[in-house]
Amino acid sequence: MITIDENLYLWINGLAGHFAPLDWLLKGIANDYFVIIASCLVLLALWSWGKDAGQRDKNQKGVICASISLGLAQGFVSICNTFCFRTRPFEVLPANLLFYQPTDSSFPSNSVAVVFGLAFAVFLANRKVGGWLLALAALHAFSRVYVGIHYPFDVLAGAAAGMMIAFLVTVAVRLLDKPIGWLLGIARRLYMA
Amino acid sequence: MAFEYFYLVLIAAVGVIQAAVAYNGLKGVCFFYYKTSAYLFALVTTVPVLISFFYWNSRNPTGVIEGREQFCLFMLAMVAAIGFTTVFSSVWNHWRFRGNEIKGEGFEALRQATFFQALRYGIGEVLKKK
């Protein structure tokens, strides 16, 4: 399993350094800020999005799920990192490193878990917007391997964890429809929703 | 670095809010009379900020803002952006929507009234019931 992971890493990371525009693009997408901030700005827009109150209500519940998933995914990865530490691939394998050298655990990928958690929660509420966010999250995951800072299994585990958390949060929010509706009602009375 | 992160997110958030409220017809919160102006404003504010974040690691090669700090800064910037938008749009649009009848609940009321006008009406309704 580890050999497959390492071979996949060497193959994907081996693509780096051959085509400068692709390196430039994926280096920007791989960083810790661009995709996360762009996704969060989409959440902000989604809060007021909808031609009628019903559609807006659905979107707002999606935003609530996405925000909770984002926080839980971050917490989950922190807990994982206290129990298991995996060395970054560039420390043990010959790599084309296009990025600074992170020192924290490689497994699971924190930023990938966060963006997938957020994107999948939105997808469960709004397929169109969520689909775009998932595509962006997938590109972010690929770029983390391409620039040399994660093994493919790190990003796959991050994506799986994020999506699982988003699914569970969505189920929980649907079960807690009354209190969530009550909170949204208060926000509506304050003209904030 | 934290300040740079904060103000960049603040600028982008103000732009995104303007695009969203213009598209959804919440005129009371919009800074502009025409939708196109709001979209242009959103483009001018959001795109350079996203480009800045795209190049963040090139500008700050080892500059990392930790997850928790990033979350706090992001939330702070959101609150500031929402606060700025509600106050500025309420003052800016006050005369335009003065005397309008306030219909609907929540965001629906902001189609024909500013945030402060709607809030004043809402508080008045609550007091009337009591």
Image: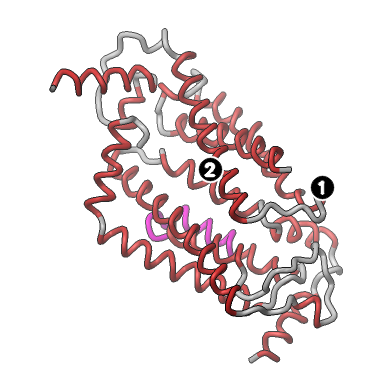
Q: Please tell me which of labels 2 and 1 falls first in the chain.
A: 1
Question: Is label 2 in contact with label 1 (beta carbons under 8 Å)?
Answer: no
In the image: residue B71, left or right of residue A128: right
| Residue at figure coordinates x 54%, y 71% from the top left | A79
**Residue topped by disc 2:** B75
**Disc 1 element:** helix
Image location of residue A5, percent across then percent down: 68, 85
Q: Give the residue drawn at x 61%, y 56%.
A: B67
Q: Is residue B81 visible?
A: yes
Answer whether residue A127 is magenta in the image: yes
Check disc 2 and give the amino acid type. Answer: Met
Of the pair A159 and A139, the residue shown nearer to us: A159
Residue B83, horizontal then vertical, whole percent: 49, 28
Q: Name the subunit of mark 2.
A: B
Residue at horizontal 57 percent and vertical 67 percent from the top: A78
The relative height of residue B91 versus residue A3 in the rendered view (above or below) is: above
Q: Secondary structure at mark 2?
A: helix
Residue at image location 80% in from the left, 62% down from the top:
A100
Q: Main secondary structure of the magenta part?
A: helix
Q: Give the extent of the magenta segment.
A: A123-137
Residue A21 % position (x, y): 81, 58
Q: Nearer the viewer, residue B29 or B32?
A: B29
In the drawing, does residue B130 fall left or right of residue A152?
A: left
Q: Is residue B80 magenta?
A: no
Q: Chain of mark 1?
A: B
Give the left or right position of residue B96, taking residue B127 as reference.
Answer: right
Find residue B59 and name its label: 1
Task: Have a look at marks 2 and 1 and say if they share a chain.
Answer: yes
Q: In the orientation shown, which residue stands out farthest toward the front? A: A82
Q: Residues within 10 Å of mark 1 (few under 14, many from 20)?
A: few
Q: Quadrant of the N terminus of chain A?
A: bottom right
